Amino acid sequence: MSGFLDANEIEKLFERASEGNLPVDADSSPGRRARWLRTVDFTRPTKFTTDQERRIRRAMETFIERSATRLVAEHRTSIELEVIDVGQFTWTNAFAQLPDHSVHIQIDTAPHEGRMLLSAELPVVLVALERMLGGRPETASRDRELTDIDLMVVQRMFGTIVEALSSVWFEVSEMTLEIAEVDTQAETIQVASGSEPTLVLTLEARLDGLSSTMALLIPYAAIAPVASAFSRHDEESKTRDPVVAAAVNAGLSHVEVSLRAEVADTQLTLAEILALAPGDVIRLDADADTELTLFADRTPVLHARGGRSGKHRAVQITGPVQETP
């Protein structure tokens, strides 16, 4: 047995996989390990790094505070938002998870051309709309269609939300956001290609006892030009505490490092090394007046000249080792 599958076995394997059955080697003889296949979910891309996910989530927490304050001040509407989930999908799978009856706000990014999508379930939008128009939220319909006038009022409310998000986004990446279009028809949404890796941030929205969800869909193409701004390295460079840095440097300065001087080197075969005897002379591949190289452990750091200090061998520093570009 060669251990390889023939064409018929491969075809049966794919048939069983399409039916949702785990592939098991039923013909394995005792003592042999069964063949295992690793399931790969291509609907869960990993284009966004963990650092980028964390920073975007922290940015969203700042956005929540600002948007809540502005909604109360400008629209007398107190909506409590909370990030409850973050995940990566392809655009097709991310968009398919949005509730059917939702309001979709397409958001343009500038100065780089990109687009994101903010989606909110219709019930919370209708309750907020009733409050903004001076009605009684508890009697508001939860499933009626939005009129053109409703959409204008909704766009004004989400304009405030997007402005709060834009201010946070600008602080992180110097990118601004603005509403491109507000729509309730999912068929007309054009934001990204179906296979585009997309980060989905799901928020819980609470208003007048009603709990609903909102979702921000961020295709990677929308942040690709400024992706480095969402990395941990960029964040640490801005928030490094000089006192902490000085304390770390002071602690590391007491670490003992082996310093050695290398005169020169040469190449010998193993047979030549085994044949060496007392009195043999090994010619090094360097001139007699060539500078020495000082190594800190295995890292070349300085050039020097060999000499003597009293009864001890010594070196005199001549300059640093120039890094080869």
Image (cartoon, grey):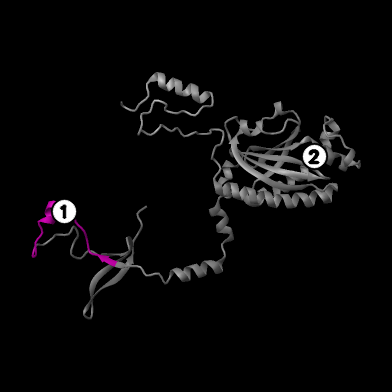
Magenta includes 174? Answer: no
Mark-to-mark CA distance, 1 and 2:
80 Å
Mark 1 or 2 closer to N-term? 2
Amino acid carrying label 1: it is Leu
Q: Which residue is mark 1?
A: 268
Asked if residue 94 is positioned above or below residue 14 in the image, the reply reads: below
Q: Main secondary structure of the magenta part?
A: loop
Residue 168 position, x and y percent, is 68, 50
Asked if residue 11 is positioned above or below residue 236 in the image, the reply reads: above
Label 1 element class: loop
Asked if residue 122 is positioned above or below residue 288 in the image, the reply reads: above
Lateral position of residue 197 relative to residue 122, left or right: left
**Segment tinted magenta in the rendering:** 260-279
Residue 269 appears in the figure: no
Residue shown at 59% from the left, 60% from the top: 239
- Which is in the foreground here, disc 1 or disc 2? 2
Label 2 element class: helix
Depth check, front residue: 296 or 276: 276
Residue 125 position, x and y percent, is 80, 38
Residue 153 position, x and y percent, is 84, 38
Q: Which residue is mark 2?
A: 124
Amino acid carrying label 2: it is Val
Residue shown at 54% from the left, 37% from the top: 45
Residue 293 appears in the figure: yes
Magenta includes 269? Answer: yes
